[in-house]
């Protein structure tokens, strides 16, 4: 009888130990699971958002790639390097260009430096009122604006908007690759004044580059 009581007591103690061990294991698993979830959440917060496969947007500026207004596209090829292109309308006809951009940060935000090529189509039979000589007066004249190309170098700062989009501010210089006036006066019997020549030189591509672009990540 005493041996039976001892066996019952030992059995109860073992059962109690098993229950306690089960509770400890379950608690440990819950703690580990909570730590994993917490670590994953911190990992998700610390990691940058995925880089969009392409940016699409609108661009504007002076002596930039799109002209006064146009469309823009940019695609990461090997971050922090991307390939970009723009097309639009400027003071010297339609304009198209593109090049490579190197970012200081691999997420394609912040500071970046670009090199590229741009080409303005020019205009045929462009009629405009300009100042002429002998005698000095304003008169409608007919011009052919010839194609002009530039080599562009610029710095940009890219401000993140939301998780995928950005605003890009550009400042640089467009080096004209065409020498001379790059236009032909087709109106006979007149001569452009110095002021008119300077005006045409001013609107011809080349010189200080200023640009602004709104890019939406896709």
Image (cartoon, rainbow, N blue to C red):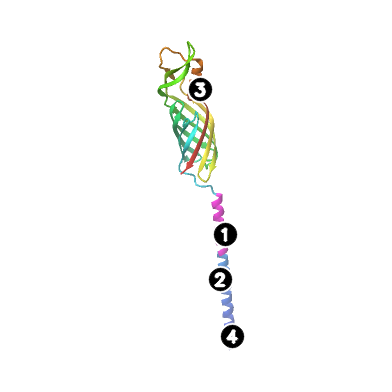
First along the sequence among labels 2 and 1: 2
Q: Answer above or below: position of 142 versus 169.
A: above
Mark 1 or 3: in front is 3
Mark 2 or 1: in front is 1
Q: Position of residue 21 (x, y in %)?
A: 57, 71
Any magenta on residue 66? Answer: no
- Regarding mark 2 in the picture, which secondary structure is present there? helix
Mark 4 or 3: in front is 3
First along the sequence among labels 1 and 3: 1
User: Which residue in the protein does label 2 denote?
Assistant: 22
Mark 1 or 4: in front is 1
Please tell me how crowded label 4 is: few (under 14), some (14-19), or many (20+) other residues with Cα within 10 Å: few
- Regarding mark 1 in the picture, which secondary structure is present there? helix
Q: Residue visible at 56% across and 56% down?
A: 39
Q: Are marks 2 and 3 in contact (CB under 8 Å)?
A: no
User: Which residue in the protein does label 4 denote?
Assistant: 5
Mark 2 or 4: in front is 2
Q: Which residue ends up furthest to the bottom in the rendered image?
A: 1
First along the sequence among labels 2 and 4: 4
Q: Residue visible at 56% across and 61% down?
A: 34
First along the sequence among labels 4 and 3: 4
Q: Distance of mark 1 from mark 3, alpha carbons?
A: 65 Å
Q: Is residue 181 visible in the rendered structure shown here?
A: no
Residue 126's disc is none
User: Which residue in the protein does label 3 denote?
Assistant: 202
Which stretch is magenta?
30-46
């Amino acid at each position: 009888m005493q041996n039976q009581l001892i066996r019952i007591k030992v059995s109860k103690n073992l059962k109690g130990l098993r229950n306690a061990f089960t509770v400890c294991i379950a608690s440990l698993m819950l703690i580990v699971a909570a730590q994993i979830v917490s670590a994953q959440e911190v990992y998700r917060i610390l990691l940058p958002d995925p880089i969009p496969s392409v940016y699409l947007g609108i661009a504007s500026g002076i002596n930039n790639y799109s002209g006064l207004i146009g469309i823009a596209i940019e695609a990461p090829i090997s971050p922090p390097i991307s390939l970009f292109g723009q097309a639009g309308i400027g003071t010297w006809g339609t304009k198209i260009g593109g090049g490579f951009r190197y970012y200081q940060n691999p997420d394609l935000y912040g500071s970046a430096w670009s090199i590229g090529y741009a080409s303005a189509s020019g205009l045929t039979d462009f009629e405009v009122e300009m100042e002429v000589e002998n005698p000095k007066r304003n008169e409608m004249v007919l011009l052919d604006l010839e194609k002009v190309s530039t080599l562009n170098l610029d710095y940009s700062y890219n401000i993140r908007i939301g998780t995928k989009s950005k605003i890009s501010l550009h400042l640089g210089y467009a080096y004209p690759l065409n020498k001379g006036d790059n236009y032909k006066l087709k109106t006979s019997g007149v001569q452009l004044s110095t002021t008119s020549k300077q005006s045409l030189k001013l609107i011809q591509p080349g010189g200080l580059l200023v640009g602004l672009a709104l890019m939406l990540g896709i």
